[in-house]
């Protein structure tokens, strides 16, 4: 029997924080936590398309990369433990002090389990990726230069993003025996995120709204860069690759994205204004998948495996062809000699 690859993350444990008012400060009818999430949701959506998260969904994430990520995450949690220790020692608010102490304990338990099972004797001997080290350094700077509430703001993106990702992936796993299904199940609950968000909302009067949003977005970017260690997003499809409803393909400059929508339509959007510049016009069908076939044909299939649209270019001579979304929004299939054999722009 396969064992789980990691222990339950401390992101799923947040002690209750007392204090603050019972009223939530609202800006234009919205709570601060909502404003922060809305500002950073595009980053979350980009994270969903990273090779790491897509690999969890399809079950084909390289186990070596998962191991690398988990060890890196263990050191991240180890350093977060130290940050909470400092917060517990320096916080003047008794409620925040108690919260930080409990949070420190949960991270200590998690990192001990990981260190024991991944044979990490000296955490300082593990070299962090530049992206992760930059993220950790930023949170340390927030702890030093801002009030305690801002440090709690800096920790919300982590718990909110993991929960959001897990819920996006739920029931969308490919394969009944997906090795990574435990990651989704372990991160479905949003109780931890809600606890932190409620605290920040109750104490929003003590925060500069714009600064809080800036801190939140910067930490969401840190999460994205961490997940992107296995590859940021998909820029092309090769033979055998496919898109499920909700999946995206990006241009290298990320100015354009191809989305296979839930209504069955395959659409290229301009990311700057959200306008559609090309579509397969297959909306109203039962979306199943789009498939880059080994004969060079790119095909949209319904849930009965019925083809309803294709590039119309195929043959044994096109084996090994790849589909790219170019930086001008043009969708192009290239053969192995890098000659275009089909494109969306005439």
Image (cartoon, grey):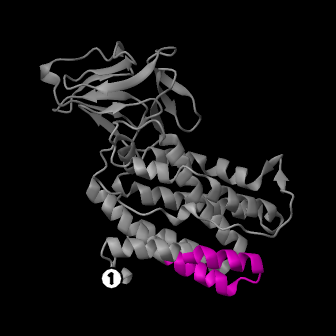
> Which residue is depicted at the point 50% across and 16% down?
283
Displayed quadrant of residue 234: top left
Q: Is 250 or 104 nearer to us in this picture?
A: 104
Residue 188 lies left or right of residue 257; in this view the side is: right
Residue under pointer 1: 121
Looking at the image, which residue sits at the far left? 317
Percent x, y for residue 122? 35, 83
Q: Which residues are magenta?
A: 79-105
Residue 140 within the magenta-colored segment of the rendering: no
Residue 112 lies left or right of residue 263; in this view the side is: left
Q: Is residue 320 above or below residue 207?
A: above
Quadrant in which the C terminus is drawn: top left
Residue 140 seen anywhere in this rendered image of the structure: no
Percent x, y for residue 251? 40, 39
Looking at the image, which residue sits at the far bottom? 89
> Which residue is depicted at the point 56% across and 38% down?
272
Q: Residues within 10 Å of mark 1 (few under 14, many from 20)?
A: few
Percent x, y for residue 199? 74, 63
Q: Is residue 109 above or below residue 192?
A: below
Q: Looking at the image, how many numbered discs can be counted on the residues?
A: 1
Displayed quadrant of residue 226: bottom left
Looking at the image, which residue sits at the far front? 1
Residue 87 within the magenta-colored segment of the rendering: yes
Q: Is 184 or 278 nearer to us in this picture?
A: 184
Callout 1 secondary element: loop
> Which residue is depicted at the point 26% across and 21% down?
297
Residue 193 seen anywhere in this rendered image of the structure: yes
Q: Is 235 or 69 nearer to us in this picture?
A: 69
Displayed quadrant of residue 303: top left
Q: Main secondary structure of the magenta part?
A: helix
Percent x, y for residue 306? 34, 13
> Which residue is depicted at the point 52% across and 21% down?
263
């Amino acid at each position: 029997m396969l064992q789980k690859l990691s222990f339950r993350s401390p992101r799923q444990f947040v002690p209750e924080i007392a204090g603050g008012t019972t009223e939530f400060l609202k800006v234009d009818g919205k709570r601060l936590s909502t404003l922060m999430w809305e500002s950073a949701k595009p980053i979350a959506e980009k994270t969903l398309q990273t090779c790491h998260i897509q690999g969890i969904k399809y079950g084909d994430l390289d186990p070596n990369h998962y191991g690398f990520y988990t060890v890196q995450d263990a050191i991240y949690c180890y350093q977060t433990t130290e940050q909470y220790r400092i917060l517990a020692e320096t916080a003047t608010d008794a409620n925040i002090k108690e919260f930080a102490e409990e949070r420190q304990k949960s991270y200590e338990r998690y990192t001990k389990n990981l260190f024991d099972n991944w044979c990490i004797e000296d955490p300082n001997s593990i070299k962090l990726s530049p992206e992760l080290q930059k993220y950790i350094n930023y949170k340390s700077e927030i702890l030093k230069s801002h009030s305690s509430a801002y440090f709690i703001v800096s920790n919300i993106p982590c718990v909110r993003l993991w929960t959001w990702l897990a819920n996006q992936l739920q029931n969308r796993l490919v394969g009944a025996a997906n090795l990574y299904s435990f990651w989704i199940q372990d991160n479905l609950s949003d109780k931890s995120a809600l606890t932190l968000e409620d605290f920040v909302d109750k104490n929003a009067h003590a925060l500069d709204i714009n600064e809080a949003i800036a801190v939140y977005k910067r930490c969401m970017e840190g999460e994205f860069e961490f997940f992107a260690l296995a590859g940021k997003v998909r820029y092309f499809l090769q033979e055998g690759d496919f898109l499920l409803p909700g999946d995206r393909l990006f241009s290298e400059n990320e100015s354009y994205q191809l989305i296979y929508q839930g209504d069955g339509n395959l659409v290229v959007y301009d990311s700057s204004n959200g306008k559609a510049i090309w579509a397969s016009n297959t909306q109203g069908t039962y979306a199943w998948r789009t498939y880059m076939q080994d004969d060079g044909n790119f095909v949209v299939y319904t849930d009965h495996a019925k083809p309803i649209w294709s590039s119309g270019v195929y043959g044994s001579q096109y084996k090994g062809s790849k589909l790219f979304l170019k930086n001008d929004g043009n969708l192009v299939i290239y053969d192995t000699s890098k000659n275009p054999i089909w494109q969306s722009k005439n």
